[in-house]
Amino acid sequence: MSALIPCIIAGGAGTRLWPVSRETQPKPFMRLPDGQSLLQKTFIRACGLPDVDRVLTVTNREVYFSTQDEYRQVNHQGMALDFILEPFGRGTAPAIAAAALHSARLYGEDAQLLVLPADHLITELAAFANAVRDARVLAQQGWLTTFGLVPDRAETGFGYIEQGPALGEHGYQVARFVEKPDAPTARQFLAGGRHLWNAGMFCMRVDAILAELQQHAPELLCAVNHCLQLSPSKQGQGELQLELDPGSFAPVPDISIDYAVMEVSSRVAVLPAELGWSDIGCWQAVRELQQADASGNRCTGETVLHDVSNCYIDSPRRLVGAVGLDNLIIIDTPDALLIADASRSQEVKLIAQQLKRQGHDACRLHRTVNRPWGTYTVLEEGPRFKIKRLMVRPQASLSLQLHHHRSEHWIVVSGMARVTQGDDEFLLGSNESTFIKPGRVHRLTNPGVIDLIMIEVQSGEYLGEDDIVRFTDSYGRAPEPASD
């Protein structure tokens, strides 16, 4: 059989899981009770399949380095990695089209794509592997094979797939896709036994999906192909990175693969599967992952409770005391607190949407922000000052840069720092410091083998992150030099 290429689609903001899920650290990066993220679990699941020697990921450019970090922690077998980096989201149809065109060019049109959303949880790994094996048989016959999850309740929050004629031993031709139903219709679907939940997972030959895109969405396919021809790529150390050209990607239609192809194609099959699946779509679903105590409470962190029942409390950093509560969701992060009726946890997205309309940072950023070189955490800020904790990984380096409107005072807490200031370069150890005036070109590097921890005190009339002029950068964030 032809090569199998798992394609992890990591998009979406997960607004129903605010304040943990935010635009720059979305739902796939959420840590579950066992310490792994949804993205890591998806990656491990893909790597565990037979005949897989590389994993392709389509994700946003902004979370590329965070995705690398997530994979690095669990990629123990040294799996080869391909990345297609989108400058902005354009739906699953353009993402899958880009993955198919990329795979056709490098791995052959007979390769099979296994499309996996990055933010789903699957607990039955053996059943998943068996389902992929059966789906590959259908895909090899030219079917666009989707995984239909056998429902265990009358769910109104998912789309459904109606089974048509049988296709051999395992699969069925799809009769139709059904939008999220009302409660009576969902109960009919459950009783009838012919409708499955649509999980958004697919297995298909590259030439088959390209042919269906050409038939049903030719303008989209043409636009994505044009974009790929203009997009630069880099390769090295077991990784290939293709960064989609923003100018040619902007006109690509924003549409899901269901609307663009699956709902109109006659070549779609569905494979019924029971995988221990959850889309972890809201805090109610997250709550169900933990064992409840005698009062029905599920808590992370230190709590003191009196007459409290059926509550989910996630506060890893601060003590929570509660009295006389029932069926609440309480999520505490360093800069935002969510309190919600558990039965209305789907409505949390309205809070995230309102914050976005207001332009509030809490919809985009956490207090701790990931960067290619490490992290920074905002400890305190006020008029004309900001205090940060910086963690710089061994051998990592910030860009050579300057700021027009602020000065910076750096204090080494632990580790070793190499500092560049203008033409000077020097080392700083623990309890040593340096001062950087506005307009002074500077750089910070960790030359050691342990994390560098620093406190940075910023002072000035403007302290925004956009007051950075980069000259050179190890991570491609500086402008390209002009050619002679």
Image: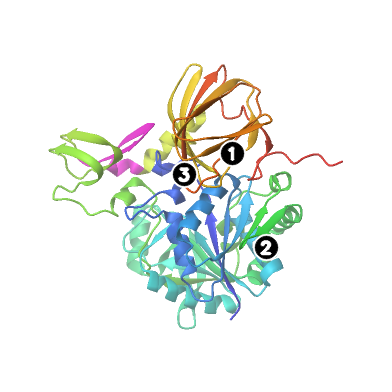
Q: Quadrant of the N terminus?
A: bottom right
Of residues 93 and 322, which is closer to you in this image? 322
Which amino acid does the dot numbered 3 rest on? Asp
* Image coords of residue 243 (percent x, y): 67, 51
Residue under label 3: 451
Disc marking residue 102: 2
Earlier in the chain: of badge 1 and badge 2, it is 2
Q: Is residue 423 left or right of residue 413?
A: right
Seen at 66% across and 29% down, the residue is: 441
Q: Which class describes the residues within 10 Å of circle 3: few (<14), some (14-19), or many (20+)?
A: many
Q: Nearer the viewer, mark 2 or mark 3?
A: 3
- Relative height, residue 21 to residue 238 (above, below): above
- Is 330 covered by the magenta stretch? yes
What secondary structure is found at the residue carrying circle 3? Answer: loop
Quarter holding residue 267: bottom right
- Please give left or right for residue 481 compared with residue 25 in the image: right
Residue at position x 45%, y 64% in the image: 44
Q: Amino acid at mark 2?
A: His
* Magenta stretch in the rendered image: 326-345
Could you tell me the amino acid type at mark 1?
A: Leu
Q: Tell me if residue 155 comes above or below residue 354 in the rendering.
A: below
Whether pointer 2 and pointer 3 mark residues with C-beta atoms closer than 8 Å, the reply is no
Above or below: residue 12 compared with residue 420: below
Q: Which of marks 3 and 2 precedes in the sequence?
A: 2
Residue 206: image location, x then y, percent: 64, 69
Q: Is 421 placed left or right of 197 in the picture?
A: right
Gap in angstroms between the C-alphas marked 3 and 1: 14 Å
Q: In the figure, is residue 309 to the left or right of 263?
A: left
Provide the residue designation for mark 1.
398
Q: Main secondary structure of the magenta part?
A: strand
Label 2: few (<14), some or many (≥20) within 10 Å? many
